[in-house]
Amino acid sequence: MIRPLAALRTPVVPVLAVAFASAALVIPTAIATGAVAAPVSGAVSGTVTAPARVGTTSAAEADPLSVTIDSMTPSVIPRKGPIRLTGSVTNTSDDPWLDVKIYPRLSFSPFTTSAEVDLAAESDPRLPFGDRITTEGHFDESIASLDPGETRAWSIRVPREVWAAKISGAEGIYQIGVQALAANTDGERPDNAIGRARTFIPLVDVRRPEVPTSIVVPIRGPVERHSDGRLAEVDEWATALGPNGRLAQLASMVDGSDTLPVTWAIDPAIVTAVEQLADGNPPRDLGVPDEEADATEDEETVDEEVPTGAAQAWLDDVTALADAHEVLALPYGDLDVAAASANDGLLYGLSRKLSSDVFKRLKVSATPAVAPPSGLLPGAAIDGIDPGTTMLMSDEAVPGAADDEEESDQPSRLQLGDHQMSLYDATMLNVPAGDVQNALTVRQRTLAEAAVRSLADDTDPLLVNLPTDFDPGTSASDFFAGLDRPFVDVRRLSTNTGGRTREVKQVDYPRRQEQRELGSASFTSARELMEAGATLDDILADTDGIERQTAEEALTYTSYMVRDDQFAAEQLADGATSWLESRLRQVTIEAPSFVILSAANGPFAVKITNGLEVPVTLSIKAHTQDNLEIRAPGTIEIGAKTSRTIQLDATASSIGVHPVDLVATDSQGRPLGSSEEMSVRSNSVGKVIWVILGVGVGILFLAIPVRLIRRYRKSRAA
C-alpha cells in the first residue's frame, strides 16, 4: 500500500502530542543548560506540509561535529538486555574540540502511524525528543580531543533498567539517537549539542502480522572514460571497490543477508567497467599490443594505479551472490528511457540487448527491468517497453496522487494497458539535509514503516527502493540481520505480489521531469560515437569488439546519471568520437587530379595508404554527377603501415569533363574521412556513336549508286 501525499497534509494530532510531550520532557534540561530547541517549519503546526520528493529536505546550519550511528543491537526494543550503539564523530569545523562526550536519548511516547513517522523523519534534526541519558557509564567519554578533520569512534551500552525507565512501553516506533557535547580550546562548552544523530527503534509484539517486504539494492552510477576508452577517475573506482567503498559495502550488505532474499537492480555498465579495471584498464583494442596513447590527457593517466585485485574480488562476489538472489537487469548504461523515447527510439532496444549480453556472458540469470531514479516515466516511454519487463515506479505516478484519498485506497501496483508497475513510496527515505543516510538508518526506517503497518494489520506489500547513490557505510553487513524480525517477511520483488492493482489509462509525469530529461544534443553525440566505432570496427581485420565497446560507452553518456551535467557528457562522447575519427583518417586515398580517357572507357590508378599499425579492409565509392561510371574492387585489403596502388575503370557515355569524388568507405558504405576530388575527360563516345556513324556511311554508299542511276536515266531521256 502506498500512502498518498494527502496523508501528510492532514492534521496529525498524535505527532503533535508526542512532539509537545517530548519537548516537555526536555524542558528541565534545557532550562538548566540554557538550550533552546531550534524551530521547525511545519513540525508543530496544525497542518503538515507535503515534503518535497527529493532525497533530502532543507535543514538548519550544519553542526561543527558530524555524528553517525553505524550500528545498533538489537534493531528493535528487546524484551530484556541492553541496547548497544556504535558510531563515529568527525570534526567538520576549523577549530579543535575537547572533552567530547556522546550521550544517548530515547523518546518517551511512540509513533503509531506512517504519517507520524514521516513527519519525524523529515523534521529538523535539532528538534529535541525524549530525555538525554547522562548517568555515569551510559554515555561515551573516551574522546579527549578532536582536531579539525579528525574522526573518532564512539560506543554506548544502555542497560535495560536505564532505557526501560525512559519509554512508555507502549507498542510503536520510538526515536533513538545521540548528541555530542564538547568544549572549545578556552574550556567553554556551548549550551546546545554541537553534533547529533537519530533513527527509529520499534517495539512490536511478536504476535503481530508479518508485512511482506522487498528490498531493492541498486548497483548504479556514472561511468566516464578517456577518449581512448580507458576508465577515468580510477582513484574514485579504487575507493568505491576498497574495503569501505560504496560498491564493496553494497556487496557486503547483500552477502550479510544469509537466507533472506534480496533483489538487485544492476546497471551492467558498472559490471563492464569493473571488468575493465580487473583487466588493467586497457584502452580500446585495435589489435596492436602496447599501443601508445596519443592524447596528452591519456599520457598523464597512464601511471594511475589500477585496483585490479579489488575489481576482480568484487566481480567474484557479485556474480556468486547473484546466483542466490534476484537480479533486475537495467538497460545498459542506465539509459534515460524517457529522453530516449523522444530522441532516439532505437537506443532502448540496443540498451536491452547489450544488457542481456553482459548477464549471459557472466552466466547470471537476470530479469529485464526499468527503474527510473525518479520513479516516473511518460506514457510514450512506457509504450516502447516490452510488457513483460519488470517496472518499478514511484507512487507519484499514480494519477491524482496528490488528491485527498484514504490510505486503504492506495494501490500497490498500476496496470497501464499490458504494462504492470510495482509502486514504492517516493518520500519514505527522504532525510533532512545534514542527516547521514547509511545502512543503519535505512534499515531502521524500513523497520519503522513495517512496524506501523503491522500494528494496523496492513499486510500490503512494502517495497523499499534504495536511493540510486546509496552508500551503506561500514554497517552494511548488519543490515539484513537486523531486518530479520517477526513482523517483517522479506521477499523477492517477483514474489511480493499481494495488495491491490489499479488499472489506469495514463500515468502522471510532472513537468519538472520533462525539463530534466536529456536533450537532443546528447543523443546526437552518442549516435556519432556509435557510427565512428562501427566504421572503425568494420575496417579492422584483427578485432571485432570496437563497435560493441563504443556502443556501450555511448549509452553511458545518455544515462540518467549525466542529467545534471549533460554538456560534460557530450564533451566526453565527442572526445571519443574524435579519437576514433583520427584513426579512420589514417587510411587515405590519393588520386590524380585529371584523367583523360582515349576511348569511351579506360583504367586509371589511385593510391591507398594505411597509416595504422594493423591491416584494414575497405572499399572505394565514386560519386559522379553525370554520365560517368567508375568501377572499383569490392573490397581492398591493405597491410599495416603500407600503401597499395589500385586500378579503377572509368566508362563515359558522353563527351566532356566529368567531376568525380572518390571516397574511402567501409563495407557498409560509411565514409572513413579521406576523399579525393578529380576530373575525367572523355574524348570518345563509344559504340553507340560508331553505330550511328556506320549507319550514316551505309546510307551514303547506298545513295551514291541511286544517284548515278537517276543521272543515267535522265541523260538517256534527254
Image (cartoon, rainbow, N blue to C red):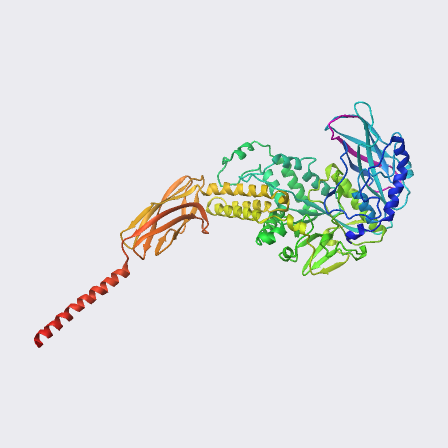
Q: Is residue 487 visible?
A: no
**Image x and y of residue 421, in percent:** 70, 55
Drawn side of residue 170 relative to residue 411, left or right: right
Q: Which residue corresponds to the image point at 23% horizontal and 65% vertical from the top-left? A: 695
The quadrant where residue 249 appears: top right
The quadrant where residue 436 appears: top right
Residue 709 sits above or below residue 385 on the image: below
Q: Residue furthest top?
A: 186
Residue 251 sits above or below residue 694 on the image: above
Depth order, front residue of 680/48: 48
**Image x and y of residue 450, in percent:** 81, 48
Quick one: quadrant of the C terminus? Answer: bottom left
Drawn side of residue 656 relative to residue 707, left or right: right
Q: Is residue 96 magenta?
A: yes
Q: Is residue 219 magenta?
A: no
Q: Which residue corresponds to the image point at 34% horizontal and 49% vertical from the top-left? A: 679
Q: Is residue 622 visible?
A: yes
Q: Which residue corresponds to the image point at 20% horizontal and 67% vertical from the top-left? A: 699
**Image x and y of residue 400, in percent:** 74, 56
Residue 593 sits above or below residue 654 on the image: above
> What span is colored magenta in the figure?
75-98
Depth order, front residue of 52/3: 52
Q: Which residue corresponds to the image point at 37% horizontal and 54% vertical from the top-left? A: 625
